[in-house]
Image (spheres, rainbow, N blue to C red):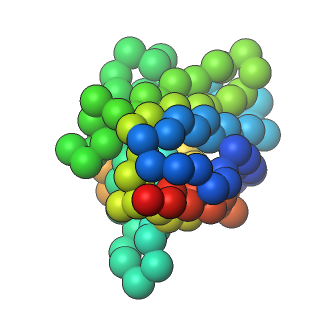
Amino acid sequence: QVQLVESGGGLVQAVGLLWLSCAASDLMFSGLAVAWFRQAPGKEREFVAVQSASGYTTDYADSVSERFTISRDNPKKMVYLQMSKLTPDDTAVYYCASRLFGVSRVATDFNSWGQGTQVTVSS
């Protein structure tokens, strides 16, 4: 399994901007699809964004499209999530995940997960 470590969470005001980072340990990182999921208190974990191994294919949840951007740096084995126009509804623990095959929106398709980073958006 790939070890993933998220960072960058914190408290931000609504309409603010925040970057999340995810560091991966796998030497084969460039062959993995990577994604961000989030889980708010009392809610199920939900898909946020995913990017293919090559970076050419990306997909976003409707709730974050036009506001969030997923990106990756394969030589550095890093995944990023740029979040803008944040609202209190974006408050959640954000998780980085990876899988060997193509992009997916389904959490159970991913076999490696980070520990999560808390994002809190104040109104």
Nearest the viewer among 23 and 8 is 8
Q: Position of residue 60 (x, y in %)?
A: 30, 38
Asked if residue 2 can be seen in this view, the reply is no
Classify the position of the C terminus by image quarter. Answer: bottom left
In the rendered structure, the answer to whether residue 103 lies left or right of residue 122 reads: left
Q: Position of residue 19 (x, y in %)?
A: 60, 36
In the rendered structure, the answer to whether residue 58 lies left or right of residue 13 reads: left
Q: Residue at x 73, y 16 (%)?
A: 75
- Residue furthest to the bottom in view is 42
Nearest the viewer among 4 and 64 is 64
- Residue furthest to the left in view is 62
Q: Position of residue 86 (x, y in %)?
A: 42, 45
Name which quarter of the figure residue 58 lies in: top left
The image shows residue 2, relative to residue 73, as above or below, that is below
In the rendered structure, the answer to whether residue 22 lies left or right of residue 70 reads: right
Q: Residue at x 31, y 49 (%)?
A: 105
Q: Position of residue 23 (x, y in %)?
A: 74, 38
In the rendered structure, the answer to whether residue 27 lies left or right of residue 57 reads: right
Q: Residue at x 36, y 61 (%)?
A: 89
Asked if residue 73 can be seen in this view, the reply is yes
